[in-house]
Amino acid sequence: MNSSLRIAIIGAGPGGLTLARILQNHDVNVTVYEREPSATSRQQGGTLDLHGEGGLTAIRAAGLMDEFQKYARPEGEHTRILDKDGRVWLDHDSPMGRPSDEGRPEIDRTHLRQILLDSLATGTIKWGHNLLDASKCSQEEDGAYKLKFENIADDIVTDLVIGADGAWSRIRPLVHTDPADAPAPKYTGISFIDLRIDDVDRFPEVSKLIGLGTALIVTDNKGLIAQRNSGGRARVYVALRVAEDWLEKESGISFDGSDPDSSLKAILALFPGWHPTILETIRRSDRASIVPRKIYAMPIGYKWTTKPGVTLLGDAAHLMSPFAGEGVNLAMIDGHDLAFAILRAVKGAPIGEALKNYEEIMFSRGQEKAQESADNIDLFFHKESPQPLLALMASHHGVPS
């Protein structure tokens, strides 16, 4: 047993936390370094569904299914598709027309993260550790890596460093012989404006429009994605095909909260002629919670040659748009698979071989979902929407178009 293996995970998102939990379940020491000062310093976003082949497999392996079920909302699978006139084209109990017995229960991102955080041993996560630099140690230190953090005097040396640090990963360059070869995410052409409604049931017309889960309202190359969260809250995502600098230079929206009323008017002006009830999802939102979000993605098929002391998971490895609904599921199943690869190395298998086996599966899975995500952008943002989206559901999921 190579129980002395020093393991550092950079990033306390669902993927990194899943990896840490499974390793600790098998008595392997691990440390998670997170730049945020605390678990509550930033909003974690809205709701997501966990898939049987993805997040649910990881939750079971982590021994957290009972905790998950306390917060899961199976009714959140309800999916509606409407057009700008308010016509309902699909109203189904399960997303994308799947039989409901397959089950992809919804859970708020905040709840999911807290379940994982609470499952870890005290002191596992080092909050407020902003990574400045990561590099290979000298050959005398047997291939280890050193990590330099902001406001931390001493470098941290580790035998295995895992980049679970998202889209703009600081670890990504390390998997390349020449760090300059590491690609950066590219703008997909899509931007979101995130809105929040704190008590959606106060507004019956909006509550009914959203339903119990998600309402997709798409027409004319733009749309609204409205999701019911727990506690009576809802998230509304304004989705637009615009230039990368449009939010700052042309939108007329002040994201610093300095002029919320004018900002809300500017958002409403993006949807001339849309049904009044649909526009209520914008009008009823909290003016203090208008957040810009540009959608980026890594090149489809991105991969690297295995290096024994470093690897990536989740968005650091295969960032994609949210239009396949796979981001967190991939991160968690990556964490699951990588945990068992590391366990093989702890028991004596060559670490390079263990990482290579993990990466080959992760590359293939990530490429498939990234392509699906890219294809779905063109179905969502289409001049004939929602027809292309309905056709996809008819061909793949048996829902009448």
Image: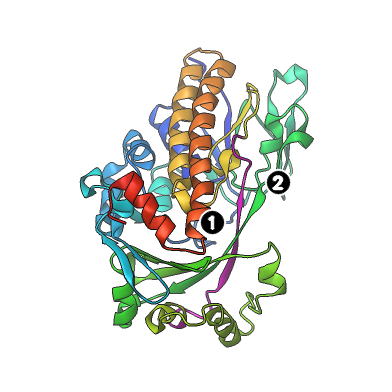
**What residue is rendered at 70% in x and 17% in y?**
142
Q: Secondary structure at mark 1?
A: loop
The boundaries of the magenta stretch are: 283-301
Q: Earlier in the sequence, mark 1 or mark 2?
A: 1
Q: Which mark is residue 38?
A: 1
Using a 10 Å C-alpha cutoff, classify the residue at mark 2 as few (fewer than 14 neighbours), some (14 to 19) or many (20 or more): few
Residue 210, image x, y percentages: 33, 70
Give the residue type that dot 2 points to: Ile
Instruction: Report whether residue 29 is seen.
Output: no
Using a 10 Å C-alpha cutoff, classify the residue at mark 1 as few (fewer than 14 neighbours), some (14 to 19) or many (20 or more): few
Q: Is residue 375 above or below residue 203?
A: above
Give the residue type that dot 1 points to: Ser
Residue 103, image x, y percentages: 26, 46
Q: Looking at the picture, tell me which residue is in the foreground, 175 or 319.
A: 319
Residue 190, image x, y percentages: 59, 60
Q: Which mark is residue 152?
A: 2
Q: Quadrant of the C terminus?
A: bottom left
